[in-house]
Amino acid sequence: MKVLWFSLSPCGSMRRKGSNLVIQGWMISLEDQIKNNPDIDLHVAFLSDVENEAFCFEGVHYYPIFHSKSKNPVKRVLERKASLSKIDARLLPAMLKIVEESKPDLIHIHGTEERFGLIAKHISGIPVVYSIQGLLAPYAEKYFSGMPDKDIFWHESLYDKVKLVSYRNEYENFCKRAEREKAFLKDAEYILGRTFWDEYVTGLLNPERKYYVVDEILRCPFYNLRWDKQRFTEGRIKIVSTISGGIYKGYEVVLKTASLLKRYSGIGFEWSIAGYDEQDKWVKIAEKLTNIKSKEVNVVLKGLLDAPELSELLVDSDLYLQVSHIENSPNSVCEAMLVGMPVIASFSGGTASLLDNGLEGILVQDGDPYVLAGAVVELSKRFDLAKKYGENARRRALARHNRERISSCLADVYNKILEDYKKHSHEDSFC
């Protein structure tokens, strides 16, 4: 079976030049399993800002889709003003050419947020299946949950506004992409998901789609390390969160929660944030809007960490906190569960599909720093309960993210889709 992936990540091809990709490393983990399946001939198409010919590496065929970006700052601004449909029209022929050259039996589009779904209306005789990562339309509803957009815009630099990279510009583009994504989902025949949230949302947009559950393979280091503390760190609780991206990820909740803990709890703590550094734009704006400085409330910004660095940070910490206003199945929570950490997470999106409240961790209302701080205080007094949560979470995560099971499951789903597609194609031609 020849399978063509469309992916935002270059997957394993980054190893060709020894690159160390922090973001979307889980796609490489999935690829490493699938490419070892003798029944699957894997091909991967991905967006690239470097113009390269197709190539083969470690048994996988790769097709870079050149998405040119001018080095001239004025031209880059003009490119940002270009309509989404104009850029789509420019890249569609390249994507269709890859389909024509690779001649796949099945096309798997990873994520509905990007423009890859444009190909679906222009090809026939090949089934197309989408994996749900995030879903932009419900994300857009929560985009400014933390802070009013007018206040954010007021605190952004004139330079960002002129360059058209302000949060208002990003939000407008986000909403346009959400409309495009809804069009993809409305016509999608096959969808892979993981949570009740993505099942319900896609079922609303397209009640006729066929939905399959396929879990994610996480990055290797999180399988190999284990949180095995016998007590919390003496004198101060070590809290850790992984946050990347912008407004709806909830950094202002971190600042407010840390401020409440410092003011009322009497607990010594240090809160490490992986993903942000002191120069991050949203960190600066969140500090201005909340009037809370990260350093003054014991929040330490660690910057981007690779998988080994992050896994070591997790097992050295005491509690994992997830503060996002909206998620599907956040890999950050899954990674914390996999190493066996006690987790406190916001009850948002599909997070409740990952862990049961009061059994494998604690779920709290998103955007509520008081209950989040209160949950930290409660667990800090009950190490045995926290450890039990971590053990239960690890047990569930090991089963959910079992690499061999997921690889076998995905291959099985591919076969089911091919059988279903052939059956209905035959019925259509018969009619």
Image (spheres, rainbow, N blue to C red):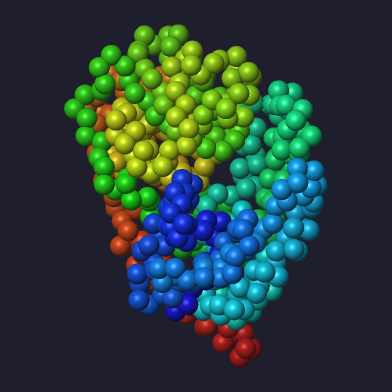
Q: Quadrant of the N terminus?
A: bottom left
Given residues 103 and 123, the one toward you in this image is 103
In this rendering, the answer to whether 239 lies above or below 311 is: above
Question: Outermost residue toward the bottom?
Answer: 430
Q: Residue at x 62, y 85 (%)?
A: 428
Residue 310 position, x and y percent, is 37, 38
x 43%, y 20%: residue: 373
Left/right of residue 408 with respect to residue 296 in the rendered view: left
Name the image quarter holding residue 117: bottom right
Q: Is residue 156 visible?
A: yes
Measured as percent of width and height from the top left, residue 228 is found at 21, 34
Residue 52 locus on image (x, y percent): 60, 65
> Which x, y percent locates residue 324?
51, 34
Residue drawn at x 60%, y 29% as measured from the top left? 282
Q: 18 left or right of 381?
A: right
Q: Residue at x 73, y 26 (%)?
A: 157
24 sits left or right of 230 in the view: right
Query: Against 52, is 138 above or below?
Result: above
